[in-house]
């Protein structure tokens, strides 16, 4: 069997809803990846520590509280400062279209909203894994979808 | 392997070294360390107990590393590694390193790579290493292949006194913890275990701990240091051998193609064994 990808799924901030995060974690598991779930209400620092300790290649952030515009870029910045800018970051939850450009600018490579199929997420994972400039610290402005 | 970064104290370097070993690179070390194995059935509170132990060591200023094992899917090969959920201390304290490990196609409660991962940790100055097995049953003692000290975790309400009389892991453990001591029935569970053990020759401490309140954790930390190291028993050597035997299969470069041929009836089990014995 090929070496599985290691993917951290995290819930930053004060947000108690993790059904979506668990569904995504399960879909990624079923696609053959090793998924590390952090549990609820983690700080950006805790999440970055988890990514480093687990030597993850991907980080999925879920937020339904409206704090994504603050928390997601902060996590990307911390990852870059911790020498793990190679980690590919994607997000999901309730994220207004108007907020997306700033998140892409911050280094998030995909934003998945309600109604996303697990196939779409898995397509993103395999596409991004094959690229060498998809990390949150990469210069490239490539991202998934609009 | 470039382990200098990890040796110098870089967490990222350590994580990357552990990945190389997890992916099949063999590693051993002369460095000493204590490997504490935590095993027991699913739901008895192993992860919470590990979190409490890690916090206790960190409070004493000691570094502690955790390797927490969860099962891989036998179908997809993927895994949901959820032990961090109950180990928040790991995200906060520089003295605690925590790594989730998937079983990756091996059937034991501890995959064969864990011994080598523990060696990497020792090499990098982590002298206390806690290994949490997957939730495991009575006949699962692969933890004996890697742990110096084995703690079996039990909880109230898991069965009657005869369970403690059965042969199995209970004969190899150094300490038995009755977790969830804040719940009703913990006293009776502990009494049953003590009674069953009294017929045997080995003096195994039975301790009540509550991972929820932290009660009893200090005594457990003491007991871990007081348990005499009895050396490597024949049973442990057997588990080490079985573990390495399993590794030969699970890391064999042709394993996938051999499974393909078995699945399509091109070869039988005997022929598959012969193919596995061909070293690549």
Image (tube, coloured by chain):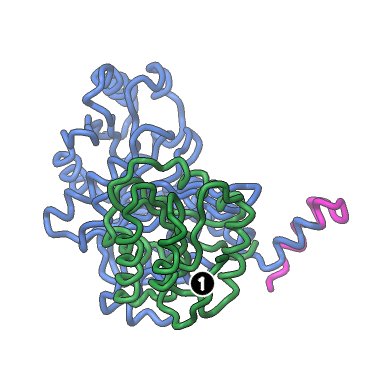
Chain colours: A green, B blue
The residue where tag 1 is placed is: B25
Q: Residue at position x 57%, y 65% from top?
A: A145
Q: Position of residue B185 (x, y in %)?
A: 28, 17
- Asked if the stretch drawn in magenta spans residue B277, the answer is yes
Q: Specify the quadrant of the image occupied by residue B246.
A: bottom right
* Identity of the residue furthest to the left in this view: B60
Compared with B163, A125 (above or below) is below
Q: Residue at position x 44%, y 52% from top?
A: B145
Tell which of A65 and A76 is nearer to you: A65
User: The C terminus of chain B lies in which quarter of the figure?
Assistant: bottom right
Q: Position of residue A97 (x, y in %)?
A: 47, 59
Is residue A59 toward the left or the right of residue A120 in the image? left
Label 1 secondary element: loop
Q: Specify the quadrant of the image occupied by residue A70.
A: bottom left
Label 1 resides on the chain identified as B
Q: Position of residue B189 (x, y in %)?
A: 30, 21
Q: Position of residue B71 (x, y in %)?
A: 51, 47
Compared with A80, A97 (above or below) is above
**Residue B234 makes an appearance in the image:** no
Magenta-colored segment: predominant secondary structure: helix
- Asked if the stretch drawn in magenta spans residue B257, the answer is no
Tell which of B7 and B87 is nearer to you: B87
Residues shaded magenta: B261-280
Is residue A117 toward the left or the right of residue B93 in the image? right
User: The N terminus of chain B lies in which quarter of the figure?
Assistant: bottom left
């Amino acid at each position: 069997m090929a070496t599985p990808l290691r993917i951290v799924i995290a819930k930053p901030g004060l947000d108690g809803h993790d059904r979506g995060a668990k569904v995504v974690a399960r879909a990624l598991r079923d696609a053959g990846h090793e998924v590390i779930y952090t549990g609820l209400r983690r700080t950006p620092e805790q999440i970055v520590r988890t990514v480093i300790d687990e030597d993850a290649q991907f980080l999925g952030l879920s937020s339904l509280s409206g704090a994504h515009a603050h928390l997601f870029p902060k996590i990307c910045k911390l990852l870059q400062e911790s020498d793990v800018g190679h980690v590919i970051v994607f997000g999901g939850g309730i994220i207004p279209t108007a907020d997306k450009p700033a998140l892409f600018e911050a280094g998030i490579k995909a934003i998945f909203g309600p109604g996303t199929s697990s196939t779409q997420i898995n397509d993103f994972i395999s596409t991004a894994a094959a690229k060498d400039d998809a990390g949150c610290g990469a210069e490239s402005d490539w991202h998934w979808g609009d | 392997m470039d382990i200098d970064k990890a040796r110098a104290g870089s967490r990222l370097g350590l994580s990357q070294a552990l990945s190389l070993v997890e992916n099949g690179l063999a590693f051993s070390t002369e460095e000493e360390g204590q490997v504490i194995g935590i095993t027991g059935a699913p739901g008895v509170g192993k992860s919470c107990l590990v979190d409490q132990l890690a916090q206790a060591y960190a409070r004493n200023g000691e570094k502690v590393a955790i390797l927490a094992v969860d099962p891989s899917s036998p179908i997809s090969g993927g895994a949901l590694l959820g032990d961090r959920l109950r180990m928040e201390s790991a995200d906060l304290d520089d003295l605690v390193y925590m790594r989730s490990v998937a079983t990756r196609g091996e059937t034991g409660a501890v995959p064969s790579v864990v011994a080598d991962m523990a060696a990497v940790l020792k090499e990098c100055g982590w002298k206390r290493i806690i290994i949490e097995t997957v939730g495991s049953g009575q006949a699962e003692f692969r933890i004996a292949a890697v742990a110096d000290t084995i703690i079996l975790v039990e909880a109230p309400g898991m069965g009657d006194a005869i369970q403690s009389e059965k042969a199995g892991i209970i004969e190899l453990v150094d300490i038995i913890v009755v977790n969830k001591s804040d719940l009703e029935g913990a006293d009776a569970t502990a009494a049953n275990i003590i009674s069953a053990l009294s017929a045997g020759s080995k003096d195994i401490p039975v301790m009540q701990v509550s991972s929820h309140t932290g009660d009893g954790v200090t005594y457990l930390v003491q007991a871990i240091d007081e348990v005499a190291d009895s050396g490597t028993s024949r049973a442990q050597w057997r588990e080490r051998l079985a573990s390495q035997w399993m590794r030969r299969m699970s890391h064999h470069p042709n394993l996938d193609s051999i499974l393909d041929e078995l699945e399509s009836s091109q070869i039988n089990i005997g022929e598959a064994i012969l193919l596995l014995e061909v070293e690549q």
